[in-house]
Amino acid sequence: MRSKLAILALLAGLYGIQASAETTQVKQINGREFRGTSAGAHVFSPSGVLQLFCFPDSNNSTAAAQLRLPSGASLQSMRLYAVDSGSQDLQVSLSKGCQPSFAGGPITSTSLLTLSTSGTPGNTTVTGAIPLQPVVDNEQCVYTIIARFGDTTTACDPNLQLQRVRLQWAK
């Protein structure tokens, strides 16, 4: 007796249908995976198990997390989970920085998607589709998520908390 998969493959072949083995996958990046982007004083603190926030006297409002994604994956969407109890917004940007594979050259930085909280107090989530669903190229590019805790890069709003970022792709 043939398995269900074998029968489906046979039927697909008879009718000229190509089966796709592409599946949707996700990567969760919690607040503790982000690091402050300035040297010196400790400006961020993990809150609870996963969240990240900045200290009130911080002079830097940005933190970054480098991503390891599977080569050839098509990036589909990003979702931000946060606590917004501040007067400013938490902004999260996905970007890639690329250089030639086997030669020196300048880094070309491209912003793929930016999400921002709306200022509504409390727990919140924001989702966005990544335009053109770019394909991951680990040979030439590095992928980074940068979080900004306020409206400027120097002043930090301690009432904003980054809980996690969820990145979805297909491969």
Image (tube, rainbow, N blue to C red):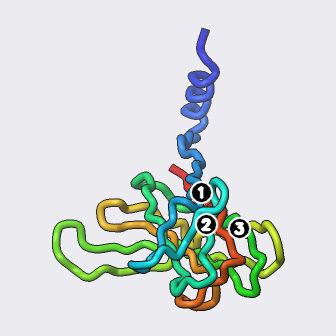
- Quick one: SS at disc 1? strand
**Residue 44 x/y as whole percent:** 55, 72
Report the residue that reaches farthest toward the top: 1
Q: Could you tell me the amino acid type at mark 2?
A: Leu
Q: CA distance from mark 3 to mark 2?
A: 9 Å
Tell me the residue that label 3 is attached to: 82
- Give whichever of discs 1 and 3 has the lower sequence position: 3
Q: Nearer the viewer, residue 95 or 5?
A: 95
Tell me the residue that label 1 is attached to: 168
Q: Is residue 18 visible?
A: no
Residue at 35% from the left image edge and 60% from the top image edge: 138
**Residue 152 x/y as whole percent:** 58, 91
Residue at 34% from the left image edge and 73% from the top image edge: 98
Give above or below for 66 relative to 18. below
Q: Residues within 10 Å of mark 1 (few under 14, many from 20)?
A: some
The answer to which image quadrant residue 130 occupies is: bottom right
Tell me the residue that label 2 is attached to: 52
**Residue 35 x/y as whole percent:** 47, 68
- Quick one: SS at disc 2? strand
Q: Could you tell me the amino acid type at mark 1?
A: Gln
Q: Is residue 8 visible?
A: yes
Q: Nearer the viewer, residue 7 or 73?
A: 73
Q: Nearer the viewer, residue 18 or 141?
A: 141
Q: CA distance from mark 2 to mark 1?
A: 21 Å
Q: Residues within 10 Å of mark 3 (few under 14, many from 20)?
A: many
Marking on residue 160? none
For discs 3 and 2, the disc positioned in front in the rendered view: 2
- Quick one: SS at disc 3? strand
Report the residue that reaches farthest toward the left: 103
